[in-house]
Image (cartoon, rainbow, N blue to C red):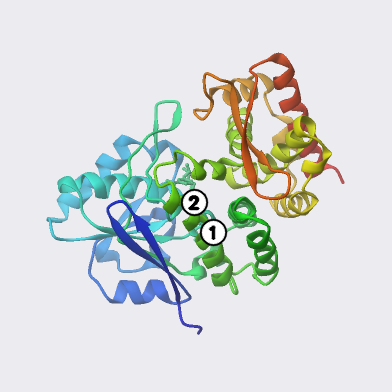
Amino acid sequence: MPAPSDILIHAHDGDYRVRVGDGTFTALMDASDDPVIVDAALVDAVGHPDRVIPFEAVESRKTLAGVEEIIEALRDRGVTRGRSLIAVGGGIVQDVATAAASLYMRGLPWRYVPTTVLAMVDSCIGGKSSLNVGPYKNLAGNFHPPAEVVIDPRFIATLDDEARAGGLCEAMKITFCRGDGAYARYLDLVAAMRTDGEGAAPLIAHALASKKWFIEIDEFDQAERRQLNFGHTFAHALEAATGFGVSHGIAVGIGTVAAERLAVAVDGPEHARPELVAEAVRLVRQAGDLRARLAALDRERFRTAFLADKKHGADGLHVILPAHGGTTQERVLARSDVTLRTLEQALDEAIAMMVDP
Ligand SMILES: NC(=O)c1ccc[n+]([C@@H]2O[C@H](COP(=O)([O-])OP(=O)(O)OC[C@H]3O[C@@H](n4cnc5c(N)ncnc54)[C@H](O)[C@@H]3O)[C@@H](O)[C@H]2O)c1
């Protein structure tokens, strides 16, 4: 078994290590007796029933009430100050565990084991929690980075094709935003990864090293880190407009192509990035036939959700588009019917590429 690789992340309240490698999860569990907040679907895979607090990973429970439930379970188990926690799961468990760890007895250190590709390559670093409030997704949250992130690619083996491909869409996006060299390396590494997670460790480490640059230079999302929203304004609107029938990572894959099409429409054909489009189409098609789900797209909801994105300003609609010569740039487009029509046309072109034979 190859030795794990370590990445050090600098955050405002201390540095933390990300360890990537096969077998790292077992080593972590054997080395501590910390209570473990676990995605309920993974309880059997995790073992250690005496230490486990199961949490059902569904969006409707990624709420303040869900956090309260975990806090209560920690109290019931007699967890005191001076202890630390482990959380095992995808982004939902990460979000509630971040919030619970930050609030329980005014904050305990915690370690995070991401179990989806999306969480492994992206959300596990950055330290943010995002909670749903009523009908609003990710409206509330805070920063409480883990003391350590432990990534064991063996968890990938039980993910379905859509979850795996969706996570890879995020890795594609991050490395594209970082620059041509990072993106070319992503293409090499993704070709070497198997669906059971074999060969995934170098790809995960590469995506995280690419994201590290953005979050260290701009931890609180004020400037450079905003580039990572590439594809996301389209993706969030697409998720909402399909009643969340398209999963987040897959929506990001479609959103990056829509953003590329928009750049060509507003900035000219030299902004086309065929190497990005080809990879996004390859990944999105792994999610299976999306025709029915995309046909259910509600245009009015798409427009409303796109316009409601919190990244827009009084000066216009803020979108991240491919820049001429590589990476991405933030562009401000006028709030107008013409812009909305252009956005929708870009989305339609992207969707056609994903579903046409
Ligand atoms: N805080 C952040 O920085 C951040 C960043 C990106 C996304 N998110 C949030 O993350 C959430 C999405 O997270 P996600 O896509 O990682 O997954 P998830 O936590 O939503 O889980 C999706 C499904 O996969 C299952 N699952 C998890 N690991 C598995 C495994 N190894 N094998 C089989 N099934 C498994 C879960 O039980 C669940 O049914 C969204 O709520 C999103 O808002 C947060």
Q: At numbered mark 1, what does the secondary structure look like: helix, strand or loop?
A: helix
Question: What residue does disc 2 label?
Answer: 214
Tell me if I can see residue 56 in this picture: no
Residue 314, given in percent of the width and then of the height, sits at: 52, 18
Tell me what residue is drawn at x 80 percent, y 35 percent.
268
> Is the C-beta separation of discs 2 and 1 under 8 Å?
yes
Query: In the image, what residue type sits under mark 1?
Result: Ser
Q: Which class describes the residues within 10 Å of circle 2: few (<14), some (14-19), or many (20+)?
A: many
Residue 125, given in percent of the width and then of the height, sits at: 42, 55
Query: In the image, what residue type sits under mark 2?
Result: Phe
Q: Which class describes the residues within 10 Å of circle 1: few (<14), some (14-19), or many (20+)?
A: many
Q: Outermost residue, front direction?
A: 325
Q: Outermost residue, bottom direction?
A: 1
Tell me what residue is drawn at x 44 percent, y 41 percent.
221
Q: 28 or 292: which is nearer to us? A: 28
Q: Is residue 336 above or below residue 224?
A: above
Occupied quadrant, residue 60? top left
Q: Which mark is residue 210?
A: 1
In the image: residue 60, left or right of residue 163: left
Residue 266, given in percent of the width and then of the height, sits at: 76, 30
For the image shown, how many numbered marks are present on the structure? 2
In the image: residue 171, left or right of residue 96: right
Q: Is residue 16 above or below residue 145?
A: below
Q: At numbered mark 2, what does the secondary structure look like: helix, strand or loop?
A: helix
Tell me what residue is drawn at x 71 percent, y 49 percent.
284
